[in-house]
Image (cartoon, helix red, strand yellow):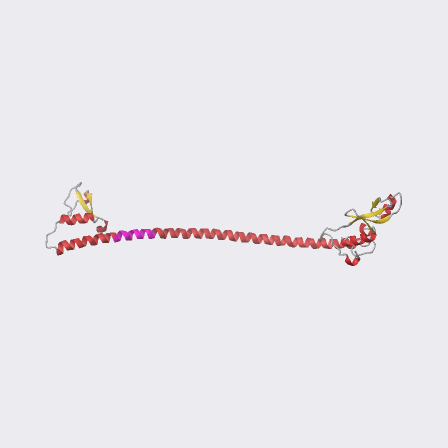
């Protein structure tokens, strides 16, 4: 992979990539000595120097050229280089401060975004609470209004039923009075025969215009030739008048 083909990977962003972990020397016998830098690796190797390179996060031994490409792609160094030195990634190099400043700037930007998100969350929760409170209030108002309307409707239905019952009573009463009036007119006015008052009284009782009852002291007057306890007739409600 050439330097032009390498795409840097900003710390904490994008997919996980292979990174450089430490310096290493690969001896001729295949043994790999690792350390903070190559000087320490040489000191720890009884046979002295070997092929200098690095160990990656995948436990691979790579030479300085490939290590440079990996470190740049992983964001461990700020710019591409041909050969990677241990100082470039241990913090002992002049680029370390630049990388730290870059990381700090990214961290500050992330903190600001988190602050904005928290603020948005607070405003969103407040809006949700206001909406829920308004919705609850509307439900209470609707329930109260519905109960009031239902109460008025029940009253109206009751009044209507009472009026219809009274109307039916009046219609029935008028029918009975009309039938009695027709009988009296036919028998008293149009008939050539003298009528018996008993027949008229019998028809009035049949039509419910008079009702049988027992005389009380209140019934004893000039219009009633009777004694307390006698069987008498009284006008029904239809003929009582005011």
Q: Nearer the viewer, residue 228 or 151?
A: 151
Tell me, yes or no, whether the highlighted magenta stretch contains residue 223: no
Please identify the dominant SS of the magenta region.
Answer: helix
Where, quadrant-wise, is the N terminus in this rendering?
bottom right
In the current view of this chain or complex, which residue is farthest to the top? 229
Whether residue 188 can be seen here: yes
The location of residue 208, given as percent across then percent down, is 21, 48
In magenta, the rendered stretch is 159-171
Left or right for 239, reference 19: left
Left or right for 136, reference 123: left
Q: Nearer the viewer, residue 32 or 225?
A: 32
In the current view of this chain or complex, which residue is farthest to the right? 47
The location of residue 119, given as percent across then percent down, is 63, 54
Whether residue 84 can be seen here: no
Q: Residue at x 23, y 51 (%)?
A: 238
Q: Residue at x 35, y 50 (%)?
A: 158
The location of residue 28, given as percent across then percent down, is 87, 46
The location of residue 68, given as percent across then percent down, is 81, 53
Left or right for 138, reference 212: right
Report the label total.
0
Q: Nearer the viewer, residue 130 or 27?
A: 27
In the current view of this chain or complex, which residue is farthest to the bottom? 4
In the current view of this chain or complex, which residue is farthest to the left? 193
Q: Residue at x 28, y 52 (%)?
A: 168
């Amino acid at each position: 992979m050439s330097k032009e083909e390498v795409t840097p990977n900003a710390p904490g962003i994008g997919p996980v990539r292979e990174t450089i972990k430490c310096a290493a020397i690969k001896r001729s016998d295949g043994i790999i000595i690792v350390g903070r830098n190559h000087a320490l690796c040489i000191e720890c190797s009884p046979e002295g120097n070997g092929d200098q390179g690095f160990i990656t996060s995948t436990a691979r031994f790579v030479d300085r050229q490939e290590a440079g490409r990996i470190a740049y792609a992983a964001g461990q160094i700020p710019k591409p280089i041909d050969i990677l030195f241990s100082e470039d990634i241990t913090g002992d190099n002049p680029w370390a401060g630049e990388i730290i400043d870059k990381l700090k700037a990214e961290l500050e930007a992330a903190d600001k975004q988190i602050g904005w998100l928290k603020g948005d969350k607070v405003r969103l929760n407040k809006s949700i609470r206001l909406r829920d409170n308004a919705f609850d209030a509307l439900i209470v108002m609707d329930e109260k209004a519905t109960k009031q309307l239902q109460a008025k409707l029940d009253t109206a239905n009751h009044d209507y039923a009472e009026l219809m019952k009274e109307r039916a009573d009046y219609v029935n009463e008028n029918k009975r009075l009309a039938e009695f009036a027709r009988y009296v007119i036919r028998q008293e006015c149009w008939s050539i025969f003298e009528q018996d008052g008993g027949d008229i009284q019998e028809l009035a009782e049949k039509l419910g215009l008079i009702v049988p009852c027992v005389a009380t002291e209140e019934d004893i007057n000039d219009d009633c030739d009777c004694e307390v306890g006698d069987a008498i007739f009284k006008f029904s409600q239809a003929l009582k008048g005011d």
